[in-house]
Image (cartoon, rainbow, N blue to C red):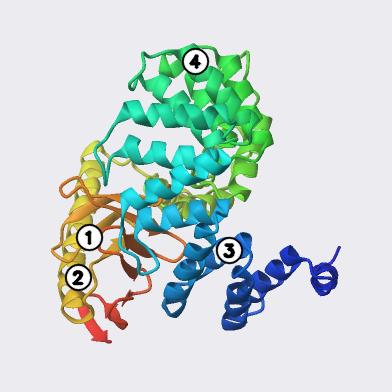
Amino acid sequence: MEENEMIKAIKEKAKQGDVNAKIALAINKVKYEGKLQEGIEELLKLSNENEVACHNLIRVVLALREENYYSETFITCKKLAEEEKEIALIDLGAIYQLGVLDTSKNIEKAIECFEKAIKLYRSGIAYQSIGAIYYYGKDIKQDLGKAFEYFEMGAKMGYADSEDAIAQMYLNGQYVEQDYNKAIYWYEKAFEHGKRIVAICMGNLYLPDNNVLNNEKKALEWYSKGGECDVPECLVMEGYLLENGSDNVKNLEKAIDCYERAAKLGSPNAYFLLGIAYMEGKIVTKNTIIARKNLEKALELGIEDARTFINKLNRNQGAKAVSDTYTSIGAYLPETTTAEMYRAKQEAKMQEEARREKNREMLKAVAATSGASGFIDDRIGCFIDKNGNETYIDADSGYIFNDTTGDISFYDKNTHSVYNTDSKEFTYLDIRDGYVYNFNTGKTTLVSGSTTLGS
């Protein structure tokens, strides 16, 4: 069915009074038609009576940072929660837990909302939410016993995230005695109930390199299960085993297929492994053009090691051009000596250090005018604060964790923005384009080299 036909069908249902159809049309206006205000206003109107509409309203105004709607959205959600609507109770608890929508963080109120959802609906997500609060212990004293208790109740309700959490606690021996059989039992339950990503955990348990259960075929079986559900990480590991495993499981043609499928799903590691495969020509016909394309994509997505192989491609291509010239005049190309390679590495290292120092100097100029809290340096995978201190970024999960202060922020690699849960500050960060935008001050600064060009 064409999209326009689908929209016509939804509009027809909306005319007949179908609330879900009306919600879908409002979201479509926001996401695809560019009618942002109109879509939000419709969601707000629908939210007065409908918790699903309110849930989507919260997601939209937070994702788009429509601050003018924060207060009204919070009031609407609170009203529905007071009417004991399940989804509204969960949403209100999350709002208090994170301190968003111009609301102060209040863990006690958050737990109160989740407990009410448990009492009225035996809500699996409410069990999970309280369990996570006690497990991480960021805004309350950590209590693994209570965490396990709530996770276990959520797991008994068939809530996949809780089943996953219980499995991890058995796997790591947290609060409970380490028990691989129980971990496997709960991972299988989580997979069965829709959390397909746990297939990677199961596969890793059986992976021979981990020296846990050591069953190569079982590992491949679980990676394959996850791959069938389009879990990129599983496809990558399935391909890796098919390429590098024993003769019992090796299948080079299928390995390439797994990497290609994972790459289509956006996996940085898949692009990296494809690049190496086409560069080396051991498991697929050698093709430096395809190799470079995949390695450059891997680098773009944060796999810094891809840079080494791209440089190697550059050197090889340069060497081949010189070699061809020498051959034509009866000469030969001497091999690069170890000393020359060492000097090249040292020079590259010095250039990298110089670049990082230049970034620090650039930051000082930016901070002075934009008030930004820092910026992301994608090439070295770190967050640099306004004092020039570097903090590791896990780009895949989107977390920035500061070992010194214990602060946790969230990094959205699609929008290049950071949200700090304590200061509630959003900052747009894209050093590649040279822009730093601070949402609190509303100032935009364009940076070139170490010079602030304007704001």
Which residue corresponds to the image point at 56% horizontal and 53% vertical from the top-left? Answer: 87
Q: Amino acid at mark 1?
A: Ile
Residue closest to the eye, 401 or 445: 401
The answer to whether residue 15 is above or below residue 387 is: below
The residue singled out by tag 4 in the image is 182
Left or right of residue 428, residue 281 in this image: right
Q: Amino acid at mark 3?
A: Asn
Decide: marks 2, 1 in contact (CB < 8 A)? Answer: yes
Left or right of residue 413, residue 103 in this image: left
Q: Give the label on residue 235, or none.
A: none
> Callout 2: helix, strand or loop?
helix
Q: Amino acid at mark 4?
A: Lys
The residue singled out by tag 1 in the image is 384
> Callout 1: helix, strand or loop?
strand
Q: CA distance from mark 4 to mark 1?
A: 42 Å
The residue singled out by tag 2 in the image is 363
Residue 60 can be seen in this image: yes
| Residue 253 figure quarter | top right
The residue singled out by tag 3 in the image is 56
Say which of marks 3 and 2 sits in front. 3
